[in-house]
Amino acid sequence: MTAFDYQGSSARILFGAGARARVLEAVDALGCKRALVLSTPHQAEEASAIASLLADRAAGLFTHATMHTPVEITERAIELMRDLGADCTVAFGGGSTTGLGKAIAFRLDTPQISIPTTYAGSEVTPILGQTQAGRKETVRAASVLPELVIYDPELTLGLPLAMTMTSGLNAMAHAAEALYARDRNPISSLMATEGLRALAEALPRIAGSPRDLSARSDALYGAWLCGTVLGTVGMSLHHKLCHVLGGSFDLPHAETHAIILPQTIAFNAGAAADELRPLSAIFGGASPGTALHAFSVKIGAPTALREIGFREEDIGRAAEIATANPYWNPREVTRADIHALLTAAWRGDAP
């Protein structure tokens, strides 16, 4: 057995259908009195229902969470928190809202509760990705990790099918890269493999029956595992490229992960063949990248960056940004490599 370090997550997890009804209990458990409920504009009505469950513990609503967590939005939310005397946040929604809650906690060190409605997984990581002046920066700090997460599969029943599939692939990306992470350990690899298995089985079932609560529950379970792994080990080329494409070119987060994942796994497959063997076993086929691409096609996920607004003429600039300050990767990366990878991803080629 190779020596390793392992630190488990300190986040408390409440999982189950109807678990959102425990939000007041969650606020009490944190010793808080006034919670600011966060959401995107699209989910304002549902966030208001969460505030109703909090009764007089709801300080108010901030419904302006935005993709990639712009610093200026965070500053507006902090100003409202101070005006209302809020002492914690309840982030309701996907990665955009979770990111806002984390950004507030990073600056104010206030407790936070997350109620995710997608499979992004960021609610169980101490990692904050925020944008300023067209660049996305990543911060890792203990204060960024939500203290309590409420997973209610009923809240994902209305998640549109297209978003379900891309969000699920986003979660899978965390686990796939965790398999070859430089600081991986036996526990992270077990969690990554189980998370990948759960999502690989659940997503096709959801594609056939979008309101199958059992399948939705399995997918949320898989997303929790994949997100937890993301919070315990470092990420590599895949996440670097997605941060560049999202932060510098404003591409949608989940769709970008879905498209880039088969390409980056194929790129690293030769250098991490042993580590990626569990992925190959789950999806079949000799090449894990090709198998992931076929799975994406099967569940109707996008496979080409041009489909989500990325311009071919921006490939060179993206490659330059991605290689200026690269993440560790099991295979050496050059600007020419990234240019070729992004070109294939732009076209939607099978790797």
Image: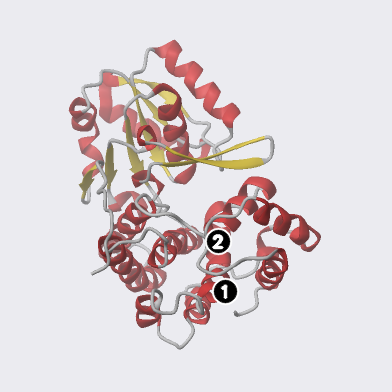
**Earlier-in-chain disc, 2 versus 1:** 2
Q: Which mark is residue 142?
A: none
Residue at horizontal 31 percent and vertical 65 percent from the top: 189
Q: Is residue 181 left or right of residue 339?
A: left
Could you tell me the amino acid type at mark 1?
Phe
Position of 297 with respect to 16 (left or right) is right
The front one of 80 and 349 is: 349
Q: Quadrant of the C terminus?
A: bottom right
The residue that label 2 is drawn on is 237
The amino acid marked with disc number 2 is: Leu
Crowding around mark 1 (Cα neighbors within 10 Å: few <14, some 14 to 19, many 20+) is many
- Position of 305 with respect to 169 (left or right) is right
In which quarter of the view is residue 219 placed?
Answer: bottom left
Could you tell me if the residues under marks 2 and 1 are in contact, i.e. CB atoms within 8 Å?
Answer: yes
Q: Which residue is mark 1?
A: 267
Q: Which residue is at the far right?
A: 313
